[in-house]
Amino acid sequence: MYSRFQLARKYLQYYITASNGRGHGIHSPFVFDFITRVLNDGHRYDAYARVEGVRAALEKDPRVLEVDDFGAGSVTEQKKARSITDITRTAVKPKKYGQLLFRMAAYYKPHYVLELGTSVGLTTAYLALADGQSIVTTVEGSPAIAELARENFRKLDLSSIALYNRPFDECLPRIIQHHPHLDFVFIDGNHRMEPTLDYFNQLLPAMDESSVIVFDDIHWSRDMETAWEKIKHHPEVMLTIDLFFIGLVFFRKEFKVKQDFTIRF
């Protein structure tokens, strides 16, 4: 994992060199459309207030949970006492990115949605609220956090989300087997190179040319940057968009040449 100073320096370099985020100079019609209709969609959707109301309550929740850590923080499972306030403020994706996921799901209208890394369920809620016809499956390894996510789904009246409380490795093959394909996948957990590439390779047979995979924290460590570069160069990947804290992967065959974009967000 990079230090805060290293990450800040990398972010500054990204901000200076990335495309300006307004679409100027972007020659790909698909990417220009993404920038103007999704990335910069300034509409205040009702879902924003609903989810952010839950976030505000969680940030003030003093309850302490015994959290199981299966990711890059530990090679073996560990338990750590953490307050819900701390989890929400430090381990949950900021609203800027949750709302971008919402806009992507609302615009591209994926039918089968998968999230690896539920956390307290806020990004899951954004994905589920984007399109009432979507079938949303999410996976969380920690029982205490999974139960908190279920509590939040009940508050938001989201009864159709399927939550698997198992490590990713145990349930991903079963989920893939029981879906004809996956249209939208958000991977937010186990920030190490080998597991990230393993999830990607397992998911590939379930992808079609309209599918999207979103990877979280692609610049979180040297390991994750290596994984991101390998994914970008995979022959099935036709387009990637680097937004620094997340990376978007598209498989559309309409692109005759591989394209990689880094866009300021």
Image (spheres, helix red, strand yellow):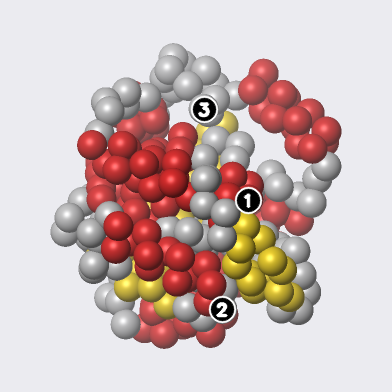
Disc 3, SS:
loop
The answer to whether 49 appears left or right of 70 in the picture is left
Q: Is label 1 in contact with label 2 (beta carbons under 8 Å)? A: no
Mark whose residue sits in front, 1 or 3: 1
Residue, disc 3: 265
**Vertical arrangement, residue 257 with respect to residue 32, above or below:** below
Comes first in the chain, label 3 or label 2: 2
Name the residue type under label 1: Asp
Disc 2, SS:
loop
Comes first in the chain, label 1 or label 3: 1
Disc 1, SS:
helix
Task: Residue at 60% x, 24% y: name it.
Answer: 18
Q: Position of residue 46 (x, y in %)?
A: 23, 37
Task: Residue at 30% x, 67% y: name it.
Answer: 161
Mark 2, Cα crowd under 10 Å, few <14 / some 14-19 / many 20+, is some
Name the residue type under label 3: Phe
Task: Residue at 27% x, 26% y: name it.
Answer: 43
Mark whose residue sits in front, 3 or 2: 2
Comes first in the chain, label 1 or label 2: 1
Residue, disc 1: 86
